[in-house]
Amino acid sequence: MGLVSTSYELIGRILYTDIYNERGTLLLGAGKMLTAKDIDSLLTNRIFEIAVKGTAYEMKPIDNIAPELLHQIDEAWNYDLEMAVIYKETLSGIKDLLGKIQEGEQANIQEILTRFFPLIKHALEHRHVFHPLHTLKGKDEYTYRHSINVGLLSALIARLLGLPDEACIEVGEAGLFHDIGKLEIPDEILNKPATLNNEEREMMRKHTQYGYALLRKFPNLPKSLADVALLHHERLNGTGYPFGLRHENIPLSVQIVSVADKFDALVSDRVYREKVSPFDAAAVLWNAQFTGLMNPAVVTPFVTYMIESYIGSKVRLSNGQEGVIVRYNHQEPLRPLIQTDKGSFTKLDVERDVQIVEVL
């Protein structure tokens, strides 16, 4: 296959061979879909000719996702075309497959996992992709987005805890299916904009048992996926459901998915409330570890990672000012140092009445 000049016109093309720099270090692997960042790297390393496959990557038309949401996804990952493409394809495919289950049709669970694998693999290799998960606005496809996001965040937490790749992927898959039992919950309860009454609340809680029963029908799936579906609302102090389990009786995979589930639910728009900022969500998790609800060994690494990774991000404060996070606060992670647009500094650990209300 012939060589072509390295240029930004190759964004979206598939690399045909491995690319190494002059020191023999692998820069890009064969099969990689080229992004603007990749082209920058190639040109910086003075690689002016490369071999690419004959045609650009062509994504199948997506007609089951709202155009506005597809546009948001493109904008969110405009620096990582591959992530945007994989996320959209995964969202569309999982919506179709889970829809079949909801309608009583036979669906191939393994096909769902096959669609999810490229996304989770890309996310684990490129941790910068996680922030845009929570910039998507609106309630469109919340159920499916939430499942995907919890899967990705669960895999991230497992990686932060030092678990091997196989375990990270399995925990991510468990996160993907944690709410599958909600397919059996009537829409008028699932999407009710007001507070559920006692009867509706009990019906909603049964989604854990429905999910367990559904996943156990597939003997080739790891049992941990069904266990997570059943137990992800358990809490360490015994106040969770369906069994009121405590501490060591709650598997680590369940504890990981519970943290990811709570965080994503808080930072996403819901039918009954608007989303909160990632900092507010992190504060909820931070408090949960001190009140006995969640495991500090799971919460602390995740919150620390999330807050540290927002350094350099623009935020809006509760006093109406905007600024950039410039320094992480090790003593109080939720109260970093902010440089405002006016050039002054706001020390949130000193100005206790000021909060971060939105990441811009």
Image (cartoon, grey):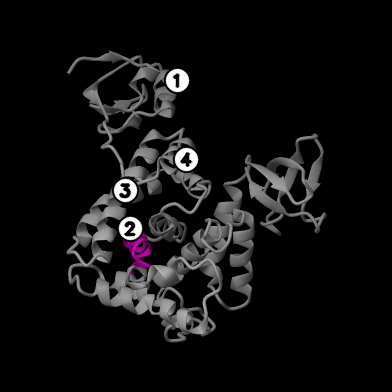
In front of the other: 37 or 160: 37
In front: label 4 or label 2:
4
Q: Are marks 4 and 2 in contact (CB under 8 Å)?
A: no
Q: Which residue is mark 1?
A: 44
Specify the amino acid type for callout 2.
Answer: Ile
- State the residue at coordinates (41%, 53%): 141
Give percent across and percent down for residue 59: 28, 35
Please tell me how crowded label 3 is: few (under 14), some (14-19), or many (20+) other residues with Cα within 10 Å. Answer: many
Furthest-front residue in view? 188
Residue 169, labelled with which disc?
2
Specify the amino acid type for callout 3.
Answer: Ser
Tell whether position 141 is magenta.
no
What span is in magenta? 167-180
Q: Quadrant of residue 1?
A: top left
Q: Which residue is mark 3?
A: 92
Determine the CA span between mark 2 and mark 1: 33 Å
Specify the amino acid type for callout 1.
Answer: Thr
Determine the CA span between mark 3 and mark 2: 21 Å
Q: Quadrant of residue 186?
A: bottom left
Tell whether position 169 is magenta.
yes
